[in-house]
Image (cartoon, rainbow, N blue to C red):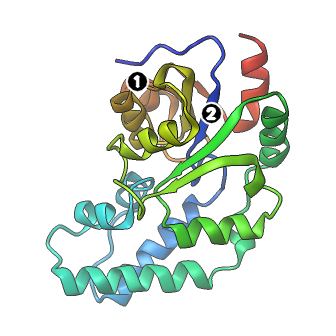
């Protein structure tokens, strides 16, 4: 069941990968490389896509439940080697994202990020887009708190911004984003530019699904 949205939220919390950044292909490629690095059989692309949004440790618990601690550490090492060796141009923001976020900030909305990325990964992404970081009041990463779909990450953002759950929207592209929002009592707005499609996001509990985050300013103006 979806959480009903307020008419005009004070706080907009964005997922990162697949929501603001076009990074799904790189993540899948690096997961494939990571399993090869660890000497393990690869998984399907559908399997890789299904864990995007989770913290890496939680992702590996689903992708490789049979792997022992040593094997999981090799997978993690392989993933980090691949991801941080990639050119930042391999993971661009979706077109128009920065202008859209800036217009939302100028319209008085508080912006935040709740991501399954590790802090090192998010900092790298923000460094590649230096004017973006100042738009966000707070960011939370999976290695700093509980991984999605647990609500703790979102609850910490609400506390840090002094926002009630009913005055916030969570914007994301995966069922993990929607499930986290629902568990925190926050309305979830889906975007279909990343992992999960419209029907899946609506079934999980999104109150609406946009084709991408650049539709959000117009969507809010129409309320």
Secondary structure state at the residue bearing disc 1: loop
Whether residue 163 is visible here, answered yes or no, is: yes
| In the image, residue 70 above or below residue 198 | below
Task: Please provide percent x and percent y for residue 28.
Answer: 48, 66
Q: Say which of 34 and 97 sits in front.
A: 97
Whether residue 192 is visible here, answered yes or no, is: no
Q: Which residue is mark 1?
A: 205
Residue at image position (34%, 44%) is: 149
Task: Please provide percent x and percent y for residue 1.
Answer: 34, 18
Secondary structure state at the residue bearing disc 2: strand
| In the image, residue 169 above or below residue 134 | above
Q: Quadrant of residue 222?
A: top right
Q: Which residue is mark 2?
A: 12
Task: Please provide percent x and percent y for residue 13.
Answer: 58, 38
Q: What label does residue 21 carry, if any? A: none
- Indicate which label's residue lies in the foreground, 2 or 1: 2
How many residues crowd around disc 1 within 10 Å: few (fewer than 14), some, or many (20 or more)?
many
Q: Quadrant of residue 74?
A: bottom left
How many residues crowd around disc 2 within 10 Å: few (fewer than 14), some, or many (20 or more)?
many
- Disc 2 and disc 1 in contact, CB within 8 angstroms: no
């Amino acid at each position: 069941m979806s959480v009903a949205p307020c008419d005009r939220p004070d706080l907009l919390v964005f997922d990162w990968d697949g929501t603001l950044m076009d990074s799904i292909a790189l993540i899948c490629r690096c997961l494939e490389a990571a399993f090869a690095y660890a000497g393990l059989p690869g998984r399907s692309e559908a399997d890789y896509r299904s864990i995007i949004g989770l913290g890496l440790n939680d992702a590996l618990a689903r992708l490789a439940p049979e792997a022992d601690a040593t094997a999981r550490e090799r997978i993690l090492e392989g993933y980090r080697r691949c991801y941080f060796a990639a050119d930042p141009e391999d993971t661009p923001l979706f077109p128009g994202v920065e202008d859209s976020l800036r217009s939302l900030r100028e319209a008085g909305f508080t912006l935040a990020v709740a991501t399954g990325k590790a802090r090192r990964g998010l900092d790298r992404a923000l460094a590649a887009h230096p004017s973006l970081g100042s738009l966000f009041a707070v960011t939370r990463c999976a290695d700093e708190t509980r991984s999605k779909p647990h609500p703790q990450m979102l609850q910490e953002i609400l506390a840090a911004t002094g926002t009630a759950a009913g005055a916030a929207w969570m914007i994301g592209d995966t069922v993990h984003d929607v499930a986290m929002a629902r568990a925190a009592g926050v309305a979830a707005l889906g975007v279909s530019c990343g992992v999960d499609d419209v029907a899946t996001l609506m079934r999980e509990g999104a109150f609406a699904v946009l084709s991408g985050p650049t539709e959000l300013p117009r969507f809010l103006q129409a309320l």
